[in-house]
Amino acid sequence: MIKVDWCRHCGAEARMTEEHLPPKSAGNAEPITVYNEVNGALKVLRSYDKGHTIPSLCLDCNGGASKRGLPQAYATWREDVFGLLGQSAAAMHAAFGWDHNDLWLLAKSETEAFWLPMEHGRGIAAGGGVSLHPGRIARQVIGMILAVQGTRQLRDERPELIAAYESKGPASLTRHSLHVALADTGTLAYFTDSVLAVTVDRSSQRGPRATPFWAIVFRPFVIMLSEGASAPIEAARIDQWLTYPDNAIFTRADRKTSYPIAHQGNLLVGFLHSGADQVRQAERPSTETV
Ligand SMILES: [Zn+2]
């Protein structure tokens, strides 16, 4: 039953609507059962008929994102990445004969990331036509991080987040940075009380470890909001995508050009946590690329 709660975006007390997280258009429209690990045993938390939802937004806020094209841009981005991963897996299979799924096992070492350039126009099925928009992607990401919060801490104490989310012009996150990495989410993500949480082993991290961060894991992404400039794991920084106004027009032709998503200096990093040990055991050649 939908109850009265505080809206994770506007903060008002209101009757909640079920927000799709990730967006329905990003592969979240099928029946799903969410499990939680309790004392080593899996327990069913909740079952959903039409994708995973959280009663976290008021009616106005839930409808507003779609009107701005935010979930659509995110879904296109995700499709793009899956297309590129598929291409990389095929290239790896052709070169080494490894199973396509072994792409997730590729890692140079425990501390060195697997770098995956984002180049648009690759791996895209014919048709489409949805604008891929860096500003809208980053705003959707902020909206999703806010939507899963169990407390008002982010919403109320960090107004720059909502300001950037709602901005139609260039925006920035003053105290924060946004990062994205690729990951096999099976070993990273779990649900607790409808809030998607992430476990990150920071023991090997260099530098200060006290930086707060908030994370969501929606396959194939780990998305992190950090206080400060650095991410808790190696990842690509994407908050500069907010410099693109919400209403800028990006067409299919723009997908083949170089803008921050695709720029050489802003490669999307895939840090493949789960497969590192297996790769080392297999003693695969260290010079391979995909
Ligand atoms: Zn609201």
Image (tube, rainbow, N blue to C red):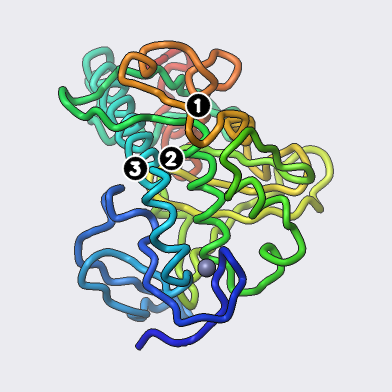
Q: Is residue 108 left or right of residue 169?
A: left
The quarter of the picture where the N terminus appears is bottom left
166 in relation to 242, above or below: below
Residue closest to the eye, 225 or 101? 225
Q: Earlier in the sequence, mark 3 or mark 1?
A: 3
Residue 153, by quadrant, is: bottom right
Residue marked by disc 3: 72
**Which residue lies under the disc numbered 1?**
114
The quarter of the picture where residue 97 lies is top left
With respect to residue 96, does 59 lie above or below? below
**x 71%, y 42%: residue:** 173
Nearer-the-camera pick, 44 or 4:
4
* Element marked by disc 3: helix
| Alpha carbon distance from label 3 to label 1 | 27 Å
Q: Helix or strand or loop: what does disc 1 sit on?
A: strand
In the image, what residue type sits under mark 1?
Phe
Element carrying mark 2: helix
What amino acid is found at the position of numbered circle 2 in the picture?
Gly
Pair 3/1: label in front: 3
Identify which residue is drawn at 44% across, 87% down.
3
Q: Residue 248's x, y, as percent?
A: 48, 28
The answer to which image quadrant residue 74 occupies is top left
Q: How would you rate the neighbour count of disc 3 (Cα within 10 Å): few for under 14, some for 14-19, many for 20 or more?
A: many
Residue drawn at 55 percent across, 13 percent down: 264
Q: Mark 3 or mark 2, which is nearer the start of the sequence?
A: 3
Amino acid at circle 3: Gln
How far is mark 2 from mark 3, CA to CA? 31 Å
Residue bearing the label numbered 2: 275
In front of the other: 1 or 34 = 1
**Tag 3–tag 1 contact (CB < 8 Å):** no
Asked if one can make out residue 95 in the rendered structure from this viewpoint, the answer is yes
